[in-house]
Amino acid sequence: MNTFRPKLWTAVGAAALLAACSPAGEAGDAGEKGEGGTAAPAAAPVGEAGETAGGEGGAGEAGAADAYRSVAPESRTALRLAHLRGFFLIAREVQKAGSADEAAALAGQGMLEVFDPARAIFVEAGVDEALLREAATKGDAVSLDRALANIDAARGKAGGDTAQVVAGLTGVAAGLYSGVVAEGAVDPIEYQHSYGAALSAKAEAERARNDPKIQAAKADLDAFYKLWPTVAAPEDAARATPPGRVSAAASRIQLALS
């Protein structure tokens, strides 16, 4: 088996992703206030390809940013909440498998990747940061369930077009999955981040199961969820589920939901 080189998670990459998702002037994109009242650094500029001006931001982040750009501005807060939910959903699955530490790490990555660059937006939407931080520290069932309930409550109040949010999540999942296999090695962290977005797409579709567009895409959505066969990345992920297959499946869903 090839040696795996884990991805280095940084605030720069997270800021780049969320900067690509925000209309001009939206809170949280250009130096929102931190807890101590000091201004946080502005997000790095993102080009059309979803990369930072410095050339950072891999294919996964670029794909996720493209998914955000495909969603109307009035649905982006809903997509942010649903994207964040995905990290906590996969954390909960990992916790069920018996690893609270790994679950806490996944929840923490969700805070870094999605919450922190747009903190003001999430707080305004009704997200209880303390609950989420607790889950990202403990990784236990109780704290994760409380965090998920809070995110779901905020999502329920956010409105937005659910079909667009589901389509956006499949784009996020496919974009992140494009970074799962690199140089013959499998990135288990990117696999789980991608799987989390797929789990959130499933939860989102369940919220609007009677929506005619969701019903029309049901078969494609059911097939999409099955592209992640296990909670942990399989060693043969490149053969079992090549990135192109995930991308094609997401495109079919997006077409059905458009």
Image (cartoon, grey):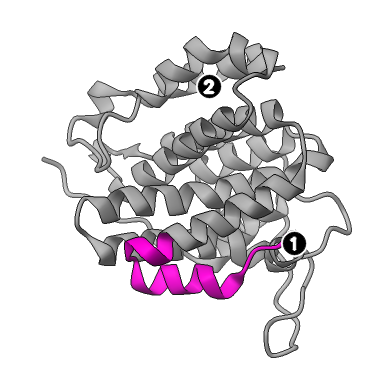
Vertical placement of 243 versus 136: above or below? above
- Magenta span main SS: helix
User: Can the viewer see residue 64 in this picture?
Assistant: yes
Q: Residues within 10 Å of mark 1 (few under 14, many from 20)?
A: many
Q: Work out whether mark 1 precedes mark 2 in sequence or the reverse, and give the earlier one.
A: 1
Which of these two is toward me, 54 or 203? 203
Relative image position of residue 136 (x, y in whole percent): 42, 69
Report if residue 139 lies within the magenta region. yes
Q: Position of residue 180 (x, y in %)?
A: 35, 39
Residue at image position (75%, 88%) is 37
Q: In which image quadrant can residue 151 be found?
A: bottom right
Residue at 45%, 54% in the rendered image: 88
Q: Amino acid at mark 1?
A: Ile
Secondary structure of the residue carrying numbered label 1? helix
Which residue is identified by label 1? 121
Q: Residue at x 55, y 67 (%)?
A: 11
Part of the protein shown in magenta: 125-144
Name the residue rendered at 58%, 34% in the picture. Answer: 204
Q: Quadrant of the C terminus?
A: top right
Q: Which residue is mark 2?
A: 250
Observer-nearest residue: 128 or 84? Answer: 128
